[in-house]
Amino acid sequence: MRRRTVLGLTAASLLCVPGAGCLGDGSSGAGNDGSTDILYTVSVAIAEESPTENLPLELGFDVRRESITEDDPFGIEFALRNEGDEPIEVSSGAPWPFGVPWLEPTDASDEPGVTLWTDAYEKSSHVGTNGRHVTAVQDIGLVEELEGGESVTRTYELYSDTPGLEPETYRFRIGVGARSGEVSEGAAFYFELVVSDGSETSD
């Protein structure tokens, strides 16, 4: 059974997030079904990775949908699995286990970031939202145990009306802290995500 712990609650409570916030092999999932015009196409690649070396923790991702239409969003699922037999404590920002991944434009550092969206934001008492955009995140750490052989997943999406989304190259990070016994380390992936105008790739 998982045990949840809250770490590092600050007196400031909510921190404003104006633009910036804060595993394995990736494979392309289903594309568009051809029923609606494609507004954007999205590609994702790992720019850098930092896996755990001493803990049997596997971080992976799967692109669920590579296009954005009026009705259907781009989707990417992240998965974290304890490949060992003993429980591992996994820590992250809110919401657990991956926090809020922000897409940061690579050529315009002053521009606000784009939120990779999940409904878990609205269910979290530690995250403030406006539409499909995160406006504030409580400065805390959340810890839960991942039992041996247990996995946890979360899907994030980009919609046609995602605030600030434009054809652009973005970077973002997914990472967790991990601890088992006296061993403590982290796992992270740094991604490059390219959003292209759908009209450029349509027949």
Image (tube, rainbow, N blue to C red):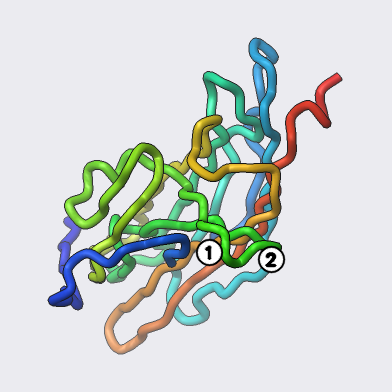
- Observer-nearest of 135 and 10: 135
Residue shown at 26%/51% (left/top)?
Answer: 128
Residue type at the position of mark 1:
Arg
**Tag 2 residue:** 47
Can you name the residue that lies furthest to the top here? 35
- Observer-nearest of 130 and 79: 130
Can you name the residue that lies furthest to the bottom here? 182
Label 2's element? strand
Label 1's element? strand
Residue shown at 52%/38% (left/top)?
Answer: 158
Q: Is residue 60 left or right of residue 95?
A: right
Residues at marks 1 and 2, CA–CA distance in whole angstroms: 10 Å
In the rendering, at what x and y percent does residue 105 appear?
Answer: 63, 58
Residue shown at 54%/24% (left/top)?
Answer: 72
**Quarter of the image with the C terminus in it:** top right
How many other residues sit within 10 Å of disc 1, few (<14), some (14-19) or many (≥20)?
Answer: many
In the rendering, at what x and y percent does residue 24 appear?
Answer: 59, 59
In the rendering, at what x and y percent does residue 116 appear?
Answer: 48, 47
Residue 18 versus residue 38 in the image, above or below: below
Can you name the residue that lies furthest to the left here? 11
The circle on residue 173 is 1
